Image (spheres, helix red, strand yellow):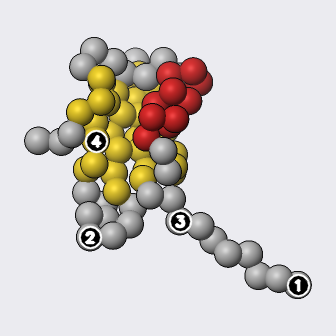
Amino acid sequence: MKKKIKVEKKYSGIGKVGYNKQTQTNICVKYRFNNVEDFIKFMNRKYKVSWINIYHRTGDEKNKLAYTWGSKKGLEKPY
């Protein structure tokens, strides 16, 4: 039996997809991916997204903010 090789994704993204009025908390989803543009297209098709924070998962920048995306401003580099 061959051992599967696990491929690590470059980015992880957390996006706000809703709001729970009873508990007064945001509803967010998290995905891991390699291509930022394809991920943003996917999120917009699947959910009504307010904002997305995209973080590095590998290299020297691991766990640091790579990009932010907002429904009004679009994709931006972090400050």
* Crowding near the residue tagged with mark 1, few <14, some 14–19, many ≥20 C-alpha atoms within 10 Å: few
Q: CA distance from mark 3 to mark 1?
A: 22 Å
Does any portion of residue 43 appear in the rendered image? no
> Dividing the picture into quarters, in which one does residue 50 lie?
top left
* Crowding near the residue tagged with mark 3, few <14, some 14–19, many ≥20 C-alpha atoms within 10 Å: few
Pointer 4: what residue? 67
Pointer 3: what residue? 8
Under circle 3, the secondary element is loop
N-terminal-most mark, 2 or 3: 3
N-terminal-most mark, 3 or 4: 3
| Residue nearest the observer in this picture, 4 or 35 | 35
Pointer 2: what residue? 60
N-terminal-most mark, 2 or 4: 2
Q: Where is residue 67? Give x, y as percent.
A: 28, 41
Amino acid residing under circle 3? Glu
Label placed on residue 34: none
Pointer 1: what residue? 1
Amino acid residing under circle 4? Tyr
Q: Residue at x 43, y 22 (%)?
A: 49
Q: Residue furthest right?
A: 1
